[in-house]
Image (cartoon, rainbow, N blue to C red):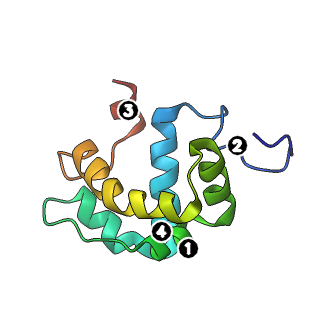
Amino acid sequence: MSSDPHRPQFLGRALPARLQVLVVLGLLVAGGVAPQVNSWVGHGANESVQPGQLGSALGQNVLAELSQRTGMSQQELLSQLSTVLPQIINHMTPNGRMPTLADLER
């Protein structure tokens, strides 16, 4: 973990893991893959997302940190995330909406 005090620690110990999900979803929506994220949350077919789209949406700093934490190359990480992330988000949102903080605390 970086010791740079100016670097957000949203993937580190500053936020509990359950809240990190909301941060990642926010990054994806802000990063241009909102239609795909909305399809994973909603009650329809899950739209696919390309690894490159995920990479652009998450940004280099997040990718570098995730790569370091997992021991995977960024390419391998993005390939796997593009496959499992839609399924994970779909599973976490059975009611067709984003989880609230209260939902995540249960």
Name the mark nearer the viewer: 1 or 2: 1
- Label for residue 56? 1
Other residues around mark 1 within 10 Å, as few (<14) / some (14–19) / many (≥20): some
Q: Name the foreground residue: 99 vs 48.
A: 48
Determine the secondary structure under disc 3: helix
Q: Are marks 4 and 1 in contact (CB under 8 Å)?
A: yes
Q: Earlier in the sequence, mark 1 or mark 3?
A: 1
The spot of residue 103 in percent (x, y) is 33, 33
Q: Are marks 1 and 2 in contact (CB under 8 Å)?
A: no
42, above or below 17, in the image: below
Q: Earlier in the sequence, mark 2 or mark 4?
A: 2
Residue position for label 3: 104
Which quadrant of the rendered structure holds the C terminus?
Answer: top left
At horizontal 86% and vertical 43% (from top left) the residue drawn is 5
How far apart are labels 1 and 3 at the CA level? 27 Å
Q: Earlier in the sequence, mark 3 or mark 2?
A: 2
How far apart are labels 3 and 4 at the CA level? 24 Å
Q: Earlier in the sequence, mark 3 or mark 4?
A: 4
Residue position for label 4: 54
Residue position for label 2: 9
At horizontal 73% and vertical 48% (from top left) the residue drawn is 8
The residue under label 2 is which amino acid type? Gln
